[in-house]
Image: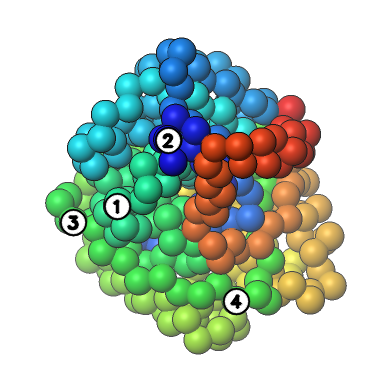
């Protein structure tokens, strides 16, 4: 097989980080996806971006995807300077749904598969955490499901939990962007001991609740005093949603990652989904914020890969056309 004839398609889930109290620690993969198609190019690097979410990103070698792929080749000591890359994404940028983590994991998974998968998932997780800085987001995109993770600046560790099929996830995505960097600047350097104890206890309870399926505990367990109160000023309506969602049927609610997306968990069979959606959208609208509501599920799988060699590359074409057709433009 010639490497120049291989093409890889990687599908990677978005993620929601923190889940309330688990700041920089808890992440959950979501059924909202980015796709990358990657192959070796013999005629110079070409990067195609599809879908409204990728507008404005560079289409030359400055693109994050290209740079991350080169890191994989360096790590594996393989030399592939020119690539053909096409990317499609339903994950909005800078809204707290882990677009940067998904893009990095897409590039790592695709580049690794292109050269025969010399790096295992843990190696990809280490590289992704070093690049992105948040093991909660990248862990969820690499392993799927719910990820409990730590990062000591050198090594990332994690344990994956299987998400319950009985959970539905409502996200309300405001029509403004909030960079993770800006939302982190709103946080203090030091916290009162009582708040630290508050968060350690809630975060531990939440992990236990999700691991055992004790969904009745999620409401108490999703409380947070470490980042949401400080970020509230950046997301008008957030405080009202976190206070009122449980009264409208939610198991619990949180800021998704660094925001501005708001997230609520609800039992799949609940008859109160429309009421909850209306509450989130109307609370934001009362603050003058238009938002899009999406109903998602926790995504159990990390990257899903399709690899084709030689003449079989043609098999990818119909799949690509279908994805391009489905991606929101
Ligand atoms: N597919 C992509 N290609 C290149 N860069 C991307 C891609 N997706 C995301 N990014 C980068 O990540 C940034 C968003 O990251 P961040 O502020 O952490 O928000 P979030 O991860 O919550 O969407 C974008 O502004 C862009 O620079
Ligand atoms: N733990 C980080 C997570 C940032 O997630 P993103 O999806 O907003 O990039 C934080 O809360 O800052």
CA neighbours of label 1 inside 10 A, class few (<14), some (14 to 19), many (20+): some
Identify the element where label 2 is drawn. Answer: loop
Q: Which mark is residue 2?
A: 2
Q: Earlier in the sequence, mark 1 or mark 3?
A: 1
Q: Nearer the viewer, mark 1 or mark 4?
A: 1
Marks 3 and 4, how far apart at CA: 28 Å
Q: Residue at x 69, y 66 (%)?
A: 168
CA neighbours of label 3 inside 10 A, class few (<14), some (14 to 19), many (20+): few
Q: Nearer the viewer, mark 2 or mark 1?
A: 2
Q: Earlier in the sequence, mark 1 or mark 4?
A: 1
Residues at marks 1 and 3 touching, judged by CB atoms closer than 8 Å: no
Q: Which residue is mark 3?
A: 155
Q: Earlier in the sequence, mark 3 or mark 2?
A: 2
Marks 3 and 2, how far apart at CA: 35 Å
Residues at marks 4 and 2 touching, judged by CB atoms closer than 8 Å: no
Q: Which residue is mark 4?
A: 164
Please state if 90 lies on the left or on the right of 82 as rendered. Answer: right
Marks 1 and 3, how far apart at CA: 16 Å
């Amino acid at each position: 097989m010639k490497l120049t004839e291989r093409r890889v398609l990687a599908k990677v889930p978005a993620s929601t980080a923190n889940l309330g109290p688990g700041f920089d620690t808890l992440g959950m993969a979501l059924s909202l996806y980015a796709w990358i198609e990657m192959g070796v190019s013999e005629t110079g690097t070409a990067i195609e971006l599809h879908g409204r979410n990728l507008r404005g990103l560079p289409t030359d070698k400055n693109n994050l995807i290209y740079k991350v792929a080169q890191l994989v080749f360096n790590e594996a000591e393989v030399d592939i300077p020119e690539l053909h890359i096409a990317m499609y994404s339903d994950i909005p940028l800078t809204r707290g749904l882990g677009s940067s983590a998904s893009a990095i994991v897409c590039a790592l998974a695709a580049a690794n598969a292109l050269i025969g998968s010399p790096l295992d998932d843990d190696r990809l997780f280490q590289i992704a955490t070093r690049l992105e800085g948040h093991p909660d987001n990248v862990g969820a995109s690499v392993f799927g499901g719910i990820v409990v993770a730590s990062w000591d600046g050198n090594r990332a560790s994690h344990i994956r939990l299987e998400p319950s099929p009985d959970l539905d996830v409502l996200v309300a995505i405001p029509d403004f962007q909030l960079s993770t960097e800006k939302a982190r600047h709103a946080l203090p350097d030091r916290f009162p001991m009582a708040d630290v104890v508050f968060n350690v206890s809630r975060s531990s309870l939440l992990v236990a609740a999700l691991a055992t399926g004790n969904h009745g505990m999620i409401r108490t367990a999703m409380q947070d005093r470490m980042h949401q109160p400080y970020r509230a000023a950046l997301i008008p309506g957030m405080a009202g949603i976190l206070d009122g969602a449980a009264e409208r049927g939610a198991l619990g609610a949180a800021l998704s990652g660094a925001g501005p997306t708001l997230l609520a968990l609800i039992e799949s069979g609940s008859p109160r989904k429309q009421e909850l959606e209306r509450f989130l959208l109307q609370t934001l609208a009362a603050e003058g914020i238009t938002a899009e509501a999406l109903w998602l599920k926790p995504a159990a799988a990390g990257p899903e890969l399709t690899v084709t060699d030689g003449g079989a590359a043609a098999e990818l074409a119909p799949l690509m056309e279908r994805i391009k057709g489905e991606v929101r433009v």
